[in-house]
Image: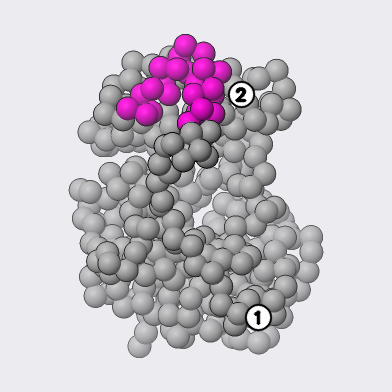
Amino acid sequence: MQPKVSIIVPVYKVEKYLKRCVDSILSQTYRNLDVILVNDGSPDNCGRIAEEYTTIDKRVRAFHKENGGLSDARNFGMKYAAGVYTMFVDSDDWLEPEMVEQMVITIEKYAADIVQSAFYYAYEDYLLLEKSSATDKPQVQVIGKEALVKELVNNQKVKNFAWGKLYKTALIEDIPFKKGVLFEDVFWAHQVMHRADKYVLLNKPFYNYFQREDSIVADYNPRNLDIIKGLKERHNFIQQHYPDLSLKSSKLLLKTSLEHYNLLFLNRKKDPGGKNRKELQAYIKTNIEQFKQATKNDRQLYRQLVFFHVHPWVNIAYLGGRKLLRRLKLVPVPVTMQRINYTEEARRNEKAYS
């Protein structure tokens, strides 16, 4: 008997994409599924579409609640998860047909707590695949408990995303997502990895992470600073449980803080009086010695820190100069992504859901 897999899909304002997502789940080669659609008070036809699926396939259950955000919808869905294993799928994304089957085979073969697959960044006309997921890499990599949180902090192999992974339900059922924040996975993932004993990576891409123009990550505003709040919360956790990783964590905090200062500068109208920029500048200044120590082996980031400490505009000018040099091809641009164009057949399939 195949173990049951619960797939939790929070649903909000995705009328255009929901069928593509749910159809990709129901067409999985793995059949013993418990599909939980959580209509998070969506004002469009998502609730009706979710109910229609319950009449089409008995594996689907639809729940309707007042709008509470992605975290609240995931937490709600977890209360009803009946599977031995659980997956989270965002409702504008979709799965490759063999994803669940291959994930279950892997988690049981290696007696793992979590399996993560590679994924595509999916656009309207093409896919992007990280070079680290190239086919010449080992198809399966096993990460033990000692290295797991380190890899999470590195954010190269082990990703912060909740989606694209298969979890033992018992591992995560009492770790709720933090409500009312963006980048909720950053607040959550380290708590999960802290519990896991064995983590397996599948380098084959099975998950399509759709890049929408109207997504929360595409339209910057100060709420995006929640990612820094999450990294600070995680940093405190790491200092307590993994002090050897404190400098790595500090380095990522600095890098993210500098990036968001620059984004706020570019969106100055959304930061009246520069309130958020001043807070970031004060935070970096207060922790300058710690950040210098964390970046001593990273010449570029250390240079940015020094320039920023002189004045944030000096760093912005430095980054602008480097960008110009890249355009003039005087500074090499690292190639981290492989582009894959959709076939004509794939385009036709996509149009069927638009």
Residue 149 is left or right of residue 45, and the answer is left
On the image, the x and y values in percent for residue 321 come to 51, 27
Q: Is residue 320 magenta?
A: yes
Please say which color scheme the image uses. Answer: one colour
Residue tagged 2: 276
Look at 70% across and 52% down and name the residue there.
214
On the image, the x and y values in percent for residue 147 come to 23, 48
Start-end of magenta stretch: 299-322
On the image, the x and y values in percent for residue 111 come to 24, 69
Query: Tag 2: residue type?
Result: Asn
Q: Is residue 91 above or below residue 102?
A: above
Q: Which image quarter holds the C terminus?
A: bottom right
Q: Which image quarter holds the N terminus?
A: bottom left
Residue 188 is left or right of residue 196, and the answer is right
Look at 72% across and 22% down and name the residue there.
272
Q: Is residue 193 magenta?
A: no
Tell me the number on the disc at residue 138: none
On the image, the x and y values in percent for residue 100 come to 42, 76
Look at 36% across and 73% down and name the residue there.
103
Query: Tag 1: residue type?
Result: Arg
User: In this view of the protein, which residue sits in the foreground, 142 or 325?
Assistant: 325
Residue tagged 1: 348
Q: Secondary structure at mark 1?
A: helix
